[in-house]
Image (cartoon, rainbow, N blue to C red):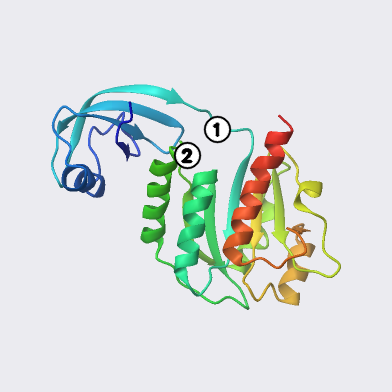
Amino acid sequence: MSYPVFYASEPELKSGLSEEESFHACRVLRLKNGDQIHILDGKGKRFQAELELVDSKKTTFRSLRMLEEIKNPNYSISLWVAPTKQMERMEWMVEKCTELGIHSIGFFHSRYSERKEIKLNRLEKIAVSALKQSKNLFLPEIKPMVSIKEIIPLPAKQDSSNQYLFAHIADPVDQALFKILHKNIHLNILIGPEGDFSNEESDSLLANSWLPFSLGKAILRTETACIAATHSVHLIHALHE
């Protein structure tokens, strides 16, 4: 039997849904007191609960019981991306990467960036919606915009449990992602703007221990590269299980 799915960050501590989720339960799905629902906490747990009071602003639940718990996988992905001018393409990317499974998605601006601001709340809502639709159990952190200058030095601040990779357009092409990726660690993947990184930025990334990789001979759109890289990481790990 299929139950309506909702998101609540701490259902074991707070027996109520957010105002947005409450509105969806009350006005969109028209659920009733006593109906059964599933709740995802975005941290690897899925629960079943009974609606106690259905209200468009504050819906509460009771009889919470855990149905499933998945521990964090032995690898994770943090994606850094220079957003495109059309935010609809970034929204689509966040949706699809959430469905595939990702630890965090951050944004940066660089010399050839098309956008220096994003609507963080909008992207967070899209991630939650994708979580519920896919029934994935992990909600990615959506990070605010920063300068690439804040990202470049990151490898010096971490240990060997992290690997830092950036998609690079080069002729001849760089090594394919599957050839240089280290398995079972935290992977930080940088996807540049459609105008690519400047020569100075590429040189700085290389000098700071970022490894260049290729996703093939074709030049992909930013959002396509993000999804391709995310899926490739999961596929590489699946093939070596």
* Residue corresponding to mark 1: 72
Q: Which residue is depicted at the point 49% across and 48% down?
A: 98
Label 2: few (<14), some (14–19) or many (≥20) C-alpha neighbours in 10 Å:
many
| Front in this rendered view, residue 56 or 211 | 56
Q: Which residue is depicted at the point 53% across and 63% down?
A: 107
Q: Amino acid at mark 2?
A: Phe
Residue 227 appears in the figure: yes
Residue 184 appears in the figure: no
Label 1: few (<14), some (14–19) or many (≥20) C-alpha neighbours in 10 Å:
few
Q: Amino acid at mark 1?
A: Asn
Q: Are marks 1 and 2 in contact (CB under 8 Å)?
A: yes
| Residue 34, position as x, y percentages in the image | 16, 27
| Residue 174, position as x, y percentages in the image | 82, 61
Q: Which residue is depicted at the point 46% across and 32% down?
A: 44
Element under label 2? loop
* Image quarter hosting the C terminus: top right
* Residue corresponding to mark 2: 138
